[in-house]
Image (cartoon, rainbow, N blue to C red):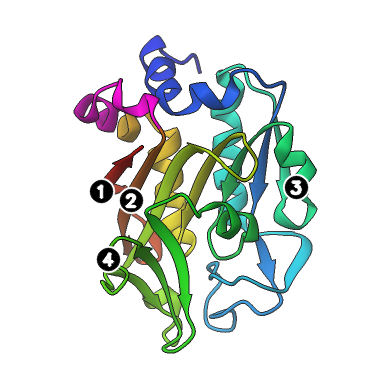
Amino acid sequence: ALRTPTETNTLSALWGPVVEKTDSVVICVGQVSSQTPWATSTRVAAPTETGVLPDILLVRDAASASQVSAVLGRMGGNPRVLGAASTNFTDLQITSGVFVGGFNNPWTLRLQAPLRYQFVRNATDQTYEIVDTKHPDSRLYQIDQTKPYSKSTQDYGIVARFLSPTTERETVIIAGIGANGTLAATSMATDERFFGEFVRSAGKNAVKKNIEILVTTQIIDNHTGPPKVLDVQYW
């Protein structure tokens, strides 16, 4: 279907800097882990940091990568999808990068350092969290690993675009605590309905800066609801 100029212009507020001055864009997708929490209780992706199984992508993360790839293609970018295990630092130093998935993507965890809201695993009580680094003791955005993820009714995600001090390239993180959070973040980043509403409220000049959007979503019968913005950071 043909896309309207409004959609392209709205989404370019997020993606424009990513496709400028680069021949291609790496989309780095989180992968299934050999130590995935909740794996025995649900088909839905669960967070983890270690033990990535090469060449295995989660269906929902692959769907997110496909949506991102389509948007980049419409923007004139040349997207290249790689699993996290197949992505090396050299790749990320020569082109913009989009990182899909949170705890199942070690590159997301490495590159999130400039962000106010960050993914943190609390080993003490087995929770996976998005932590507000300005208020690290505040525990508002978390999922309990000891309970089946399929029973969760809320998830949280991050959409961020910033110039990474690590790679010195434009970097986008689209990730959730769990799979539904990643899908909600993807909807915010690729759907004109949601990002367009955000741009209209925030103003186009605001998104010319580095940006981080904290989102949440309701989960009903293991289906992801629309993203809702909880906070926005610019720098």
Work out whether residue 89 or residue 101 is closer to the camera in this orientation and state it.
89
Q: Residue at x 56, y 38 (%)?
A: 171
Mark on residue 89? 3
The C terminus is located in which quarter?
top left
Q: Residue furthest left?
A: 201
Query: Neighbour class for label 1 at 10 Å: few (<14), some, many (≥20)?
Result: few
Determine whether label 1 and label 2 are within 8 Å by CB. yes
Report whether residue 30 is seen: no
Work out whether residue 77 or residue 57 is closer to the camera in this orientation and state it.
77
Kind of residue at badge 1 = Asp
Q: Which residue is mark 4?
A: 135
Kind of residue at badge 4 = His
Mark on residue 231? 1
Determine whether label 4 and label 1 are within 8 Å by CB. no
Kind of residue at badge 3 = Phe
Q: Secondary structure at mark 3?
A: helix
**Viewer-nearest of labels 4 and 1?**
4
User: Would you place residue 206 above or below residue 2 in this image?
Assistant: below
Q: Quadrant of residue 137?
A: bottom left
Left or right: 101 in relation to 23? left
- Give whichever of discs 2 and 3 has the lower sequence position: 3
Q: Quadrant of residue 85?
A: bottom right
User: Would you place residue 193 above or below residue 22 in this image?
Assistant: below
Q: Secondary structure at mark 4?
A: loop
Query: Neighbour class for label 2 at 10 Å: few (<14), some, many (≥20)?
Result: many
Residues drawn in magenta: 196-209
Q: Secondary structure at mark 2?
A: strand
